[in-house]
Image (spheres, coloured by chain):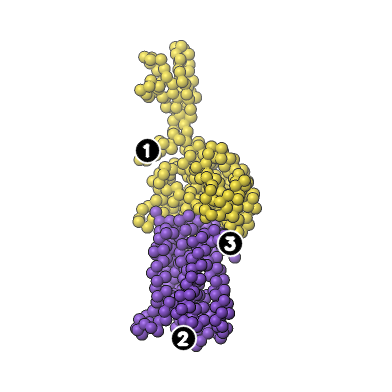
Amino acid sequence: MTAIEVRGLTRRYSGGFEAVRGVSFDVERGEMFALLGTNGAGKTSTVEVVEGLSRPAEGSVRVLGHDPFAERKVVRPRMGVMLQEGGFPPDLTVSEAARMWAGTLTSPRPVDEALSLVDLAHRASVRVKQLSGGERRRLDLALALLGKPEVLFLDEPTTGLDPESRRNTWELIRALLREGVTVLLTTHYLEEAQALADRLAIMHRGRIVAQGTVSEVVDAYPSRISFVPPPGIALPVVADVESSGRVTVRTNELQSTLHELLVWAQHHNVELSGLDARSASLEEAFLAIAEEAA
Amino acid sequence: MRAVAVGQAELKLFWRNRTALFNSLLLPLLLAPVLYSVDADGVPLVVGLIGFALLMAVYYNLVTTFVARREELVLKRLRVGELTDPEILAGAALPSVVVALGQMVLYTVVVGVITGVALPARPWFLLLGVLGGVAVFVLLAAASSAFTRTVEMAQVTSLPVLMACMLGSGLIFPLSVLPGGIASVLKYLPLTPVLELLRAGWADGPVLQPLIVLAVWIVLGTYAVQRWFRWDPRR
């Protein structure tokens, strides 16, 4: 079953600038879908329309089968949102801010539970203005979870978090996914998308330029083998040579190319120092796509 | 009433904000002698104090509140929740309105006891004036906030409404001292019909025209808020 359905979404700002140009994607129930892209690619502009903050200039959006803008009353109680930049009154304490939010919800979970989920229970009586940037992100996440959402929107949820908090947040998101929550994530941490997302789309200048599972997106790009060969030796494979003497071999068949190379090296008693072989990563795909599209 | 949750939070913020406390609670007390010197009769003093409560505790306070919450991205955050837009605005306005109503009751009782003002003969006009006045100045505050970039700028952007209402609505001096032509134009300011209705609570006076003017201001205010109100900061 489809939780989010976006068809031909276009968003224009009052100046006439088209931030999103004909974007389409589906997010299935219980799945995490990640929107990736460079800054200004249109991720947040897209997500804001899906959240129902604004009406699309063209195209249509359905969240749990409803129009999130026109049928806000029906959709909102079933979704939770963490904005890229959301605010809380600086002079409220953490628990006051959370209690205020809980008071606006149809069926909130206990405030203490929500704060514990994001490891903020020990900061409950601290004023919002005294929180660190990472703690403020976690408070925002706690509010997004307060309504026990079926669909969760996370706009760069781990920006500003230290590595440990980031890992904890990932664990929390994984637990939510196991419970069947649908998540639409935007991030510019590619390893975050690689670690969590079932499927993803890469946006560039308002369009989706690649879409699929992580491996579908990544498989279109070659794997790499790199090493430093002894000087003056002829290699059995085509390779790019860097000024440092390190060479890089790009291949779509990592295993057989690597095998060929190793057999050759043993046969000729050649040492491949600093040998490094890796499948294409999301980062590589992402950079290549941004480069191609530029 | 889910908006009450926002109102409760706003009330806490109100008590933690010294400027707002001063403007709403102390300023009217400082003005009382000025108003009292204008006319030793109790009714104009009560009417004047209620007018000031509407201007300072409701209008001025709410311009700064709406701007502050917008710039803190609080309005944007609330807008992705379950509340409707009117509920968000009502929630943010709630404590200022409650405090203003409390002041009005207090002033009326205190001044009434001191000067021996009779109970209003037609209290429903008093009530209409107060409720209509609250509605108009909440709406005008929301509309003014759209043209106010920072909390500090509210001191400037609120001046047109504040000055026009203080000088032009018979708050500081009675309109009868002005030439007839000017006085008849000033009848259309937002505060004038409120004060006329308040006075009509005690003594015979025009009622229909102020009610119509007030209704028109509520419609205009609603339109202005729908047209111009900003939920996130200008970039």
* Residue at which label 3 appears: B8
**How much space separates mark 1 and mark 3, taking CA atoms?**
53 Å
The relative height of residue A143 versus residue B105 in the rendered view (above or below) is above
Looking at the rendered structure, which numbered label has been put on residue A193?
A: none
Q: Which amino acid does label 3 sit on?
A: Gln
Give left or right: position of A231 versus A266.
left
Disc 2, disc 1: CB below 8 Å? no
- Residue visible at 45% across and 47% down? A43
**Can residue B84 be seen here?**
no
- The chain letter of the purple chain reads B
Report helix, strand or loop for mark 3: helix
Above-or-below relation of A293 to A263: below
Could you classify mark 1 by the number of other residues whose Cα lies within 10 Å: few (under 14), some (14-19), or many (20 or more)? few
Q: Quadrant of the C terminus of chain A?
A: top left
Residue B13 x, y percent position in the rendering? 54, 59
Name the residue located 46 percent from the left edge and 62 percent from the top edge: B64
Q: Look at mark 2 in the image and give the residue it sits on.
A: B206
Count of residue discs = 3
Q: Which chain carries label 1?
A: A
Nearest the eye: A43 or B141: B141
